[in-house]
Amino acid sequence: MVGGLLGVMGMNTAPSLVGVSKATGATSRYIAFSCAAILVVFAFIPKYAALFLLLPQPVIGAAMVFTSSFMIAGGIQIITSRNVDSRTTYVVGVSLLLGLAREVFPDYFKRATPVVDLFTGSMMSIGVLSAFLLNLIFRVGATRSVVLEFEKSDEPVDNLEKLLRGRGRAWSVAPDVMDRAVSTTQQVFRHLADAGLMTGSPSVVMTYNDFDLTVSIRYQGALLSLPNVGVRKRFFLEEESFAYGLADFLTGVYPDRMEARSEGQNAEIRLIFGG
């Protein structure tokens, strides 16, 4: 917007810089600030900036091959960082095919109206737009949830790992995320049982939306103290229960985020694990 108001060339992020950052491992924002300052100085000294335009074409071509290779590899790494299920397969596959179709059948897209040509003028715009729209469409119904009920308070620790891992395999949850979720949930149940805070029949609600895995532990009884979580307590726990396990509590509980709340005798602890 500033560039447009000043009547200068439009500015945007450079994809090649992603390849440079990946190749060098330098991703500090202080480097960006320094480079921005240098570019500001060059803006007032056009002759120095023109030196880059005098580089030989073979040098420019080699630099483009170098940065493009890392950029493509980084893009593939980002795509495969998530579990590639049927939804992701269609988003990636259809978007690539539509983008390549722009170069394979250029006459077909040239017959489009000027309004449509704004979005189909290049294979990049077609691929990005189709990936964005398909991702929005396939997000419908992507969140999966299951409720695990237990009849006795001492039963969950014995059967919890089998039930959670079985559901995790069905939902294609990353193994490392699943390991943390199982270990943390078991630790929370052990602390609840040993401190005598849980009464009645507990339940576990497991939710996965392809990004975050949430395990909600619902039970009747006193709310377990969660250190350093910023949970506002509605009542004071007994001294023995409050002091129990605080020293080693965090050694066995390591989700990305924890939330806890209580209403009367109903308590809930939410463990959120980022994928």
Image (cartoon, rainbow, N blue to C red):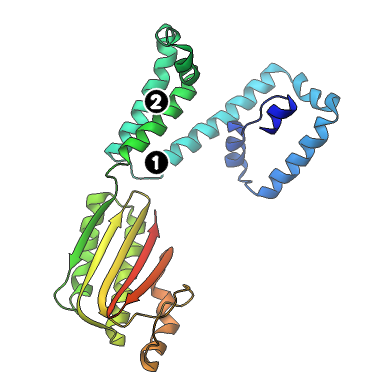
Which quadrant is home to the N terminus? top right
Residue 246: % across, % down: 43, 83
- Mark nearest the camera among 1 and 2 is 2
Q: Which residue is mark 2?
A: 96
Say which residue appears at 40% left-offset and 69% top-offset: 259
Of residues 3 and 155, the one nearer the viewer is: 3
Mark 1 residue crowding within 10 angstroms, few (<14) / some (14–19) / many (20+): few
Q: Which residue is mark 1?
A: 80
Residue 140 in which image quadrant: top left
Mark 2 residue crowding within 10 angstroms, few (<14) / some (14–19) / many (20+): some
* Amino acid beneath label 1: Thr
Q: Is residue 263 above or below residue 76?
A: below
User: Which residue is farthest left?
Assistant: 151
Q: CA distance from mark 1 to mark 2?
A: 15 Å
**Which comes sooner in the sequence, label 1 or label 2?**
1
Of residues 68 and 220, the one nearer the viewer is: 220
User: Which residue is farthest bottom?
Assistant: 239
Q: Is residue 53 above or below residue 192?
A: above
Residue 68: % across, % down: 56, 29
Q: Secondary structure at mark 1?
A: helix
Q: Secondary structure at mark 2?
A: helix
Say which residue appears at 76% left-offset and 25% top-offset: 52
Residue 138: % across, % down: 31, 38
* Amino acid beneath label 2: Leu
Residue 135: % across, % down: 36, 36
Residue 225 in which image quadrant: bottom left
How many numbered marks does the figure carry? 2
Mark sitting on residue 172: none
Say which residue appears at 50% left-offset and 32% top-offset: 72
